[in-house]
Amino acid sequence: MPSDSTAGGTSNKSAATPFNDFASLATTKVEEVVSIVRDRTVTPVLRAVRFAIFGLLAASVGVLLAILLAVGAVRLLDDYLFHWRVWASYLIVGGIFSGLGLFLSRMRHPRS
């Protein structure tokens, strides 16, 4: 008796039906479009948000360190150099910050 592959339920389905081919093609195209849209919209926004967050974090840490440095400098100068004449410590630290600000201001607008 000849064996029929469809009778035993083991039919050869290597040839795809047009509907299955259309479904897989449509799914592939939708995935490609979604990937392109995500790469062009979400990725730049994600980079900008990361830059903003890390920039704010770095600025916060920088401001905190500047404040701690100023307070520590005033305390060290007051205790060890000027012996409880805090106005002299403020004068020195204020002069340093003023000089630094003037230098940075000159660097911002160079003479042409």
Image (spheres, rainbow, N blue to C red):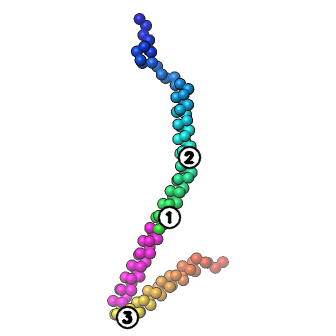
**Residue 98 place in picture, x, y as percent:** 50, 85
- For label 3, the SS is loop
- In the rendered image of this protein, does residue 49 appear above or below residue 58? above
- For label 2, the SS is helix
Q: Circle 1 sits on which residue?
A: 52
Q: Amino acid at mark 2?
A: Ile
Quadrant in which the C terminus is drawn:
bottom right
Q: Residue at x 38, y 91 (%)?
A: 86
Please rate how many residues cluster around mark 2, counting C-alpha atoms within 10 Å: few if below 14, some from 14 to 19, many from 20: few
- In the rendered image of this protein, does residue 83 appear above or below residue 106? below
Give the Cα distance between marks 3 and 1.
Answer: 43 Å
Q: Residue at x 44, y 90 (%)?
A: 91
Where residue 85 is drawn, which disc sits there?
3
Q: Residue at x 52, y 25 (%)?
A: 16
Which residues make up the magenta segment?
57-79
Quadrant in which the N terminus is drawn:
top left
Please rate how many residues cluster around mark 3, counting C-alpha atoms within 10 Å: few if below 14, some from 14 to 19, many from 20: few
Q: Amino acid at mark 1?
A: Ala
N-terminal-most mark, 2 or 3: 2
